[in-house]
Amino acid sequence: SVGSPRRPRLRESFTGRNAFILVAIGSAVGLGNIWRFPYITYENGGGAFLIPYLIALLTAGIPILLFDYAIGYKFRGSPPLAFKRLHPKAETIGWLQVGICFLIAIYYSAIIAWAAMYTWFSLTQAWGDDAEGFFFNEFLQYDAGGTEGTGISVDFVAQVGWPLIAVWAVLLVALATGVRRGITIVSMIGIPLLFLMFILLVGYSLTLEGAAEGLNALFTPDWGALTNGTVWIQAYGQIFFTLSVGFGIMITYASYLKRRSNTSGSGLVVGFTNSSFELLSAIGVFAALGMLAVAGGTAVDEVASSGLGLAFVAFPTIVSEAPASALIGVLFFGGLTLAGLTSQISIMEVVISAVKDKTGWSRVKTVALVGGLIAIISIVLIGGVSGVTILDVVDAFSNNIGIVGGALIAVVMVAWVFRRLDSLAAALNRFGSFKVGPIWKTLLGIVLPVVLSVLLVMDITDK
Ligand code: PFF
């Protein structure tokens, strides 16, 4: 249907509602769910954190998710085109979001490649008895053949280069074959598989000695946290990141919805499924951390961490300690790989669709030129030179100031300058089972700008 020269080109569309929901869940469920949420909950009041978290989901997360969906669905375009159709002066807002996605795409792929490698390493426990030294000194040793300090020669191409190239190959093929094929197929297979793997991971972790200690550490509520402003800010920050809102992803995916789509109903499914997965993953992670603490005779506090430290230091150690070691490693790192891939596809699709809409190039050409460019930058920069440093700097900027700032600009401009909330609400309500009205508009027009401004000031001042 696409590409017939005599008819105007039709925008691609999802095959159906389930495809859209799975692909959107694929984007939402990512590293944020697996290595960020558990620790944020633990650090910010444990069980008590679930209250601000839930409030943030309902007052900010779902409303802005539906806002993104409404823009993509009503204006049927990548962020720059959709915003331009919303108002001729608004195209820049879309390009800003595309820019953030471009930056994130460069380094996110490296983490996926590492996770894929660690899935393999789990079988042999390649890290020996020093997971930390292995990761930072040997694995991330970038000079090809470097032996510095470790006495072990590591060939960069074999260790980091090939996996990263393989990840990019999968990404580019999925993107080049399009919304109905590659993009949908990866999530249709990957997301159910990921859920299955994490259910098994949780079931297995709960049988480990120390699981109860881990879960107590995670969930024991510290009610005092509820009066602490930082805790609330953490809750809102987590919600924005985990739902992939505010940086163009959900606008892009919703632009491929058919006219008669229950967009708002799908949004609720995506939002609640994402949070359920987050909770599931927190249970698995902390049960395993509890095992690690008990095995080492320490408190959970000593072993709890997030991000790279949790995934590439704590988890390998867990794998070494656990009775059925390879199993827990394959489930965890395999899951991390799948979660990362489907999120990375979504972020790449923002850039691809934006360039495609602007230039009129075919999908394959856009993927080859733009996707290829990002892949090369990623492989050379992250794989070759100074991966972790770049990753830290770009991550801190794009994930905090970039995403929050981008969301703030979009919401304020659309609500107050261009005044389009009514027409967006009408678009959602046309075929949507969940009707939005004055509460949604108040949350977007008033509550969200305040919350996002506070988050932005916090990000700028203390990071
Ligand atoms: N929702 C994703 C997560 O929680 O990990 C956020 C995300 C990050 C999406 C990076 C896409 C991406 F490339």
Image (spheres, rainbow, N blue to C red):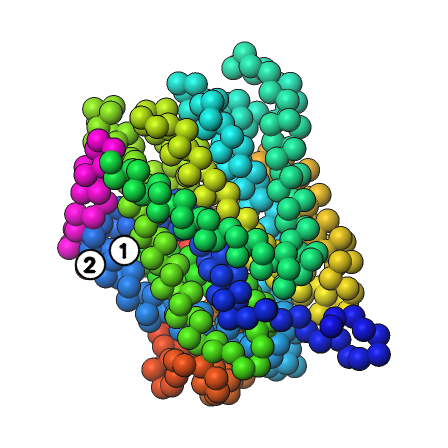
Query: Spatial distance from mark 1 to mark 2, Cα to Cα?
Result: 7 Å
User: Observer-nearest residue: 8 or 406?
Assistant: 8
- Residue type pointed to by label 2: Leu
Please say whether residue 229 is visible from this viewpoint: no
Q: Earlier in the sequence, mark 1 or mark 2?
A: 2
Say left or right for 266 vs 77.
left
Q: Which residue is mark 2?
A: 226
Q: Residue at x 20, y 55 (%)?
A: 48
Q: Which residues are magenta?
A: 208-230
User: Which image quarter holds the N terminus?
Assistant: bottom right
Which corner quadrant of the image does residue 256 belong to? bottom right
Q: Which residue is mark 1?
A: 231
Query: Which secondary structure dominates the residues rendered in magenta?
Result: helix
Instruction: Give the image location of residue 113, x and y in percent.
Output: 56, 38
Instruction: Give the image location of residue 280, x and y in percent.
Output: 32, 50
> How many numbered discs?
2
Give the SS element for disc 2. Answer: helix
Please say whether residue 19 is visible from this viewpoint: yes
User: Observer-nearest residue: 180 or 219?
Assistant: 180
Ligand 1 closer than 8 Å to label 1 CB: no
- Residue 400 vs 353, above or below: the answer is above
